[in-house]
Image: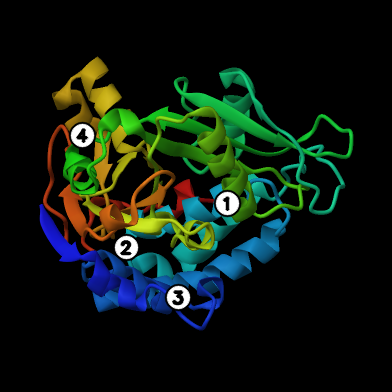
Amino acid sequence: MEAVIAGQAAVAWQSDIPFYSKSPGQKLAEIERAFGFKIDPSTVEDHERLANLRWEFQNRIGKSNPCSTRAVAKLFFSYVKYGPRLLHDRELTAATIEGFVREFGRVAATNSTSARGAQGSLDILDPATVNKLMCRYHFLGYGRGDGWHLGLRSREGTSNLLAVATFSAWDIDHADSALRQLEVDRSEVLVLARLLSISGGRITLSQFIAQLVRWVRRELPRIKIITTYCNPNAGHYGTVYRGANFLPLCAEEHPFIPFHDGEYISPRKLTALCDAEGIDHCKRAIRPSAVKPIPLLLYYYPVRLPKRAQDFQVMTCRHPYPFDWPIPMAGQGEFVENAHLSSLT
């Protein structure tokens, strides 16, 4: 694992300009400095172009569309899958956008409360209730069966949920070195594995996270830090976590991003597929991304951590895969060579 002094990286972590108002290029530049890795300039330029597509797409499907976050993530993963061609081939761009508009443009809004900013009770929920929402609206498309499942309800007397979340135990073995630097045991870590705002609830995710942190402090006295993932390849630059005062913990490198039947599949799901069907099957069924992924970002929140322990080295770790593939040159991936527009329209 490579390390970067957190104190040096933190110099640019705070800024007079709100992070949420910055361009993708500015956000990625701050991420580079904070986590200590470099992003190819062509990738940064592509993310600037993706931002234009993103706003055009969101206007098409409606900014209040409850599937907006999932839809935008699929747009970003399309870039990872096809590479820069998605941004320069007008026919491919149009076909991709139209396909997503058909998929997400007619999704009805959830029957949520009309309360404006009313932050109500935080309740423990059963996994089925939370995971049903995660399957429909979260960009990963599935929930977690383990851990704590929490939901925020309005205090306006309605049972409708404003936001839901899932905490799970630390199982990120390849990043254990970061915990040792913080002098934290694995049992003292909670992972914010899923986070979802439900359309109609006028509460920011940063406000929801603040309530989750208070709940952990009150209910789980052994927990010292909360960690969470952020995936820039899905268009998530960490704005919500910065707003909730999370700090950089580890940059997680991936050799490629896997796709199964043309859809993004998480490393966890890929491992499960290989365990069930065998590596040879996965090598035939899985297709790698056309571009090298930006490292995923691990953030942490110091729930009960001495300040001396917070001055540590931001780590770089590598996520293990059942098998590796070389990353093709941009525009040279199999998806690019075999992109049939008829399958997108």
Rendered residue at 35%/78% (across/down) = 12
Compared across the picture, whether 301 is left or right of 127 comes to left
Q: Earlier in the sequence, mark 3 or mark 4?
A: 3
Q: Earlier in the sequence, mark 3 or mark 2?
A: 3
Checking the image for residue 49, the label placed there is 3
Disc 2 secondary structure class:
loop
Q: Earlier in the sequence, mark 4 or mark 2?
A: 2
Q: Nearer the viewer, mark 3 or mark 4?
A: 4
Compared across the picture, whether 175 is left or right of 263 comes to left
Disc 1 secondary structure class:
helix
204 over 8 or under it: above or below: above
Disc 3 secondary structure class:
helix
Residue underneath mark 1: 69
Q: Nearer the viewer, mark 2 or mark 1?
A: 1
Answer few, some or many: residues within 10 Å of disc 3's Cα (few below 14, many 20 plus, some between 14 and 19).
some
Viewer-closest of 289 and 35 = 35
Rendered residue at 21%/61% (across/down) = 332
Label 2 to label 1, Cα distance in Å?
Answer: 21 Å
Answer few, some or many: residues within 10 Å of disc 1's Cα (few below 14, many 20 plus, some between 14 and 19).
many
Q: Earlier in the sequence, mark 1 or mark 3?
A: 3
The amino acid on which the numbered mark 3 sits, given as a three-letter code, is Arg
Label 3 to label 4, Cα distance in Å?
Answer: 36 Å
